[in-house]
Image: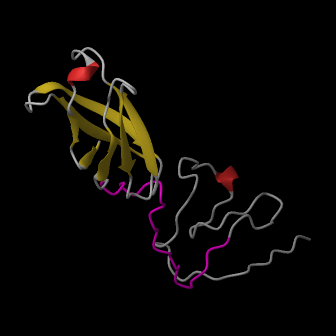
């Protein structure tokens, strides 16, 4: 004698979902309400008449679009000279993530003529400052450099 115990009741047929809707043979053991029973009489699933509570899915951090990066700042520390052929610039990243910034440096002579303009990409860790050294190369003699100008806005690459 086989005993069958049910843990819930169903008053309607239109609210169930089936994981195997392709099986239509009598061997699946599904009754009209979607409760599955095997040949041995045990219950393989239950269908309750209580309402189903569904949680609202929330976006995971990785699926959210990244916030646009804020531009950083660039400050000239020292200009290139015959003693040190590098312009030194501090680049600050105000963002909460690592970013790459475009830094613009101009090398000028005593008359204000631009000997060379540079645009370099510099990686800066989140909420940090990086010191960048830019060689003055190919623009003429180092002794002709009178000053360097740095764009104070380090543009974040988006």
The location of residue 152, given as percent across then percent down, is 23, 49
Along the horizontal axis of the image, is 41 left or right of 30?
Answer: right
Examine the rendered structure and indicate whether residue 119 appears above or below residue 62: above
Quadrant of residue 137 in the image? top left
Q: Is residue 152 magenta?
A: no
The location of residue 27, given as percent across then percent down, is 69, 51
Q: Is residue 107 visible?
A: yes
The location of residue 114, given as percent across then percent down, is 12, 28
Q: Residue at x 9, y 33 (%)?
A: 112
Quadrant of residue 94 in the image? bottom left
Report the span colored magenta.
Answer: 46-68
Outermost residue on the right side: it is 1
Q: What's the colour scheme?
A: secondary structure
Examine the rendered structure and indicate whether residue 1 appears above or below residue 51: above
The location of residue 146, given as percent across then percent down, is 20, 32
Examine the rendered structure and indicate whether residue 2 appears above or below residue 53: above
The quadrant the C terminus occupies is top left
Looking at this view, is 150 or 93 the one in front?
A: 150
Q: How many numbered markers are drawn?
A: 0
Q: Main secondary structure of the magenta part?
A: loop
Q: Residue at x 27, y 20 (%)?
A: 142
Q: Is residue 98 visible?
A: no
Looking at this view, is 35 or 106 the one in front?
A: 106
Q: Residue at x 30, y 48 (%)?
A: 74
Quadrant of residue 113 in the image? top left
Along the horizontal axis of the image, is 46 left or right of 24?
Answer: right
Q: Is residue 49 magenta?
A: yes
Along the horizontal axis of the image, is 70 left or right of 15?
Answer: left
The quadrant the N terminus occupies is bottom right
Looking at this view, is 99 or 85 the one in front?
A: 85
């Amino acid at each position: 004698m086989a005993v069958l115990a049910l843990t819930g009741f169903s008053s309607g047929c239109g609210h169930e979902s089936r994981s195997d809707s392709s099986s239509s043979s009598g061997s699946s053991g599904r009754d009209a309400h979607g409760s599955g029973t095997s040949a041995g009489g045990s219950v393989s699933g239950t269908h309750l008449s209580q309402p189903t509570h569904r949680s609202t899915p929330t976006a995971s951090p990785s699926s959210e679009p990244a916030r646009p990066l804020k531009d950083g700042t660039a400050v000239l520390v020292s200009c290139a000279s015959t003693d040190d052929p590098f312009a030194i610039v501090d680049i600050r990243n105000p963002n909460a993530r690592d970013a790459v910034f475009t830094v613009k440096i101009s090398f000028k002579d005593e008359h204000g003529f631009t000997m060379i303009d540079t645009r370099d990409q510099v990686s800066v860790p989140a909420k940090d400052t990086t010191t960048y050294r830019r060689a003055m190369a190919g623009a003429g003699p180092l002794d002709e450099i009178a000053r360097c100008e740095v764009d104070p806005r380090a543009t974040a690459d988006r």
